[in-house]
Amino acid sequence: MRLDTLTIVGVGLIGGSVGLAAKARGVARRVVGVGRDERTLARAVAVGAIDSFTTNLGDGASAADLVVVCTPVDRVAGDVLTAATAAPSRSVVTDAGSTKGNIVRALNGMMPPKAAPFVGSHPLAGSEKKGAAHARADLFADRIVVVTPTADTDQEAASVVDLFWQSLGARVIRMDPFEHDEALAATSHLPHAAASGLAAATPVGWLGLTAGGFRDTTRIAGADPDLWAAIFEANRDAVLAATDRFADRMAEFRRVLAAGDRAGLVRWLAEGKKVRDALGS
Amino acid sequence: MRLDTLTIVGVGLIGGSVGLAAKARGVARRVVGVGRDERTLARAVAVGAIDSFTTNLGDGASAADLVVVCTPVDRVAGDVLTAATAAPSRSVVTDAGSTKGNIVRALNGMMPPKAAPFVGSHPLAGSEKKGAAHARADLFADRIVVVTPTADTDQEAASVVDLFWQSLGARVIRMDPFEHDEALAATSHLPHAAASGLAAATPVGWLGLTAGGFRDTTRIAGADPDLWAAIFEANRDAVLAATDRFADRMAEFRRVLAAGDRAGLVRWLAEGKKVRDALGS
């Protein structure tokens, strides 16, 4: 894939990595960054993630062959609408948000007739760190990107989006946006809440008594609270359901432990090990 | 420190690493392994973790200058008693178990008058892997070892145990055994249960939609269910208390999310981030 102009809206860790990867792999001749803070955008130029920038989304999208919206999930739909309206009709708009159903719902019936087509994406890659300073050209290499067309999606645009992520080294799978959200509530959003809950439930005075287990289990608790609050709210119902399943599971742990039911405790642990072993190290 | 004979009871990941470290650092002239399975012990010889072995604990301890009991926590007290009774009075017995109060309780009033003195230890190092095949000479380098003497503990023996772990590269801190257990319930045992609960609550069909967050958060769910069931039971009260604190914390997450309380959600996440950031990456 060889684009003339790639526009990235929101040049943080993900957006910056899209830019670095696109440039490293020759996927775009020119990468334009769009953001609200000129100093942040200037730093993204300095690290080589984008070639130029603007704080005006309409301007940034007007010459784009592809627009990738990498803003927080509660801003994606609005940015997609603005970008799709300003971009040439022949271009394609996608995003990189952790939730997909909220975007489909928000855009339903809102797109003007000549708007560029939109296809949602979610690269399963990231970091608890933030900002283009932590961006990496290989962030998407061998990672999964979920592309989430609906029945209304332009098929050609969906193929362009597939090809784009594949050109950055990712493996693309396609899913229904709402099914995506239900799965990610379990595989990403709930683990985030649990990591944060574990960290917060630990008195700071005991942190010297932690080892690798605590470190790994709570790592993602260091992520940005605003970004994650937006993700939880955008996927509220599925996250609540996953949280309830987890609470039931932990209540069962409490029950077998309190009862002194050794065999039940071993079985409870073995069920978790079976799933984790299926994932591999 | 230069011991003539070091006896290791239970030559798995931890015991094997004690042997490798002691030999690599010249801490012991001779390392004797004690276990129940001759094939396991022969493999520990093959990887260089021990020089010789016996399946008779009394024999293995009889010439020891130091005995380190590395068996599962529900077997530590019994093995300590046997080893301390068989070992020369001038020697010292310690262990490497994840729980300490249960050993103190079990040994209370049980030690014969001429028994070698016992001092509990807990190296905060390990792995979800098991067996001497995964042992590492550097497992304890720069790691914390908690040494847990009581009011009745022989002070000279406690100093020997401190020095031993320091000679393997560890940093030693001393704590009351029951305080240790309360802290470790939060910093190690609960995170283990939560990791297992998260893994078990995830449908296997969605594992392809996991990324680094899930992988890190659930890593320790792959550990041995029998070993961990024993740890949870040995520290039941403190683990139940930590589990309840965590459940309260997760219920608060559910409450602010269900209420659409964005500010409360951000605050909830920020409290976890604050603790995790205090730990460092």
Image: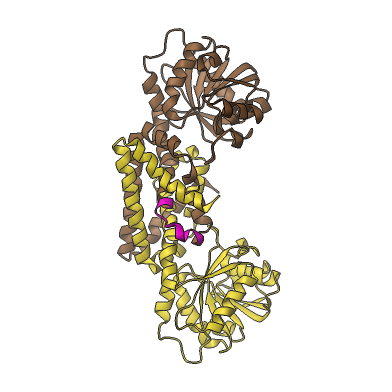
Chain colours: A brown, B yellow
Residue A245: percent from left, percent from top: 33, 45
- Name the one closer to the observer, A28 or B85: A28
Question: Would you place residue A76 above or below residue A230 in this image?
Answer: above
Relative to A40, is B41 above or below? below
Which image quadrant is residue A229 in?
A: top left
Magenta region, residue range: A199-208
- The residue depicted at 35 percent of the width and 37 percent of the height is B263
Dominant secondary structure (helix, strand or loop) of the stretch shown in magenta = helix
Residue A81: give x, y in percent of width and height: 44, 17
- The one of A264 and B63 positioned closer to us in this rendering: B63
Residue under the image location 35 percent in, 57 percent down: B243
Report the side of B140 relative to A112 (left or right): right
Residue A127: which quarter of the image?
top right
Camera sees residue A177: yes
| Residue for point 61% across, 35% down | A133
The image shows residue A191, relative to residue A164, as above or below, that is below
> Residue B68: x, y in percent?
56, 76
Quadrant of the rendered image containing residue B104? bottom left
From the viewer's perspective, is residue B155 above or below residue B167?
Answer: below
Using the image as rendered, state which of residue A208 and residue A168 is in the foreground: A208
Residue nearer the viewer, A82 or B10: A82
Quarter that holds the N terminus of chain A: top right
Q: Answer whether residue B167 is magenta in the image.
A: no
